[in-house]
Image: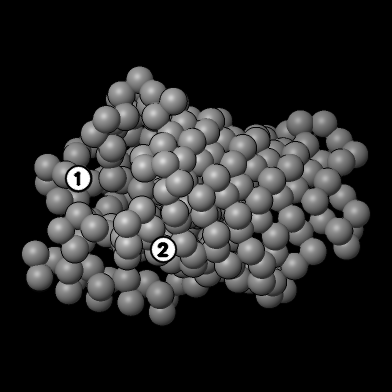
Amino acid sequence: MIGVHTAAWRCLVALLVALAAPQSRAADRPFLATNSAAAEEDDDGVWSVETWYQRAGAVSALSVAPEYAFSPTTTLQFEYARERDRDARETTHGVEIEFKHLFNHIRRDGYGWGIVGSLAFDKPQDGGWKRAGFSANVPFSVALWDGAGTLHLNIGARKPREANGEWTAAAAIEREVAKRTSLFAEVARAGDARLLHAGMRWWAVKEKIALDFAVQRLRAGSIDSGVVFGIGFYDL
């Protein structure tokens, strides 16, 4: 496993240099732009609900995302987000539907991979609901530190409404550092937008209720920094 760990770290460092993603609604918490390919063995016919607040510069957003796991490898998520731009004095609403299927189990093989597809809609303050675009990506995850951590890599593409398609990429890493406590970090890119995001997840109730705190730095035209607070309820 030492060789796998070394290769994983080299891959992550390379991506940290090459990448640096817009805030994207399609992701697996505690990340903002990265999907995980690590199947939870007991996620069979269960619900989870994740909600988080994030702020970067003048823009703040509140998101709620219920998810149903048909099996440990197949999930469907519905996300609603309300975004407020204080400078423009505008509020936008967004909805995204995401389907994920994984092709293997990380606990058995030491790695996991799959495919994720999503369709998004938004509603500007002075307009009706419109399709915002669609995206697809291939997530790949590798178990590290005898299962105490995981490296996640994503490559994909998205097609915003009335814009050209663009490649997307993300890398994230997480590791348990104390009982019920883990640290995480991610970098991502889509077009000219870049995201840096890092923080801590604490399990208030093991495998049931998780609290997240993180900082982020978003570059999309301007450079904005901010915070992210989240809470997730699992195995419902």
Q: Nearer the viewer, mark 2 or mark 1?
A: 2
Q: Is residue 63 left or right of residue 208?
A: right
In which image quadrant can residue 44 be found? Answer: top left
Mark before the other along the chain sequence, 2 or 1 = 1
Separation (CA) of disc 2 from disc 1: 19 Å
Q: How many marks?
A: 2
Whether residue 51 sits left or right of residue 204 in the image: it is right
Residue identifier under label 2: 184
Quadrant in which residue 88 is drawn: bottom right
Q: Are marks 2 and 1 in contact (CB under 8 Å)?
A: no
Label 1 sits on residue: 106
The amino acid marked with disc number 1 is Ile
- Residue at the extreme bottom: 17
Image coords of residue 134 (percent x, y): 55, 40
* Residue 62 in picture, x, y percent from top left: 69, 46
Q: Is residue 127 visible?
A: yes
Question: What is the secondary structure assignment of the residue under circle 1?
Answer: helix
Is disc 2 placed on a helix, strand or loop?
Answer: strand
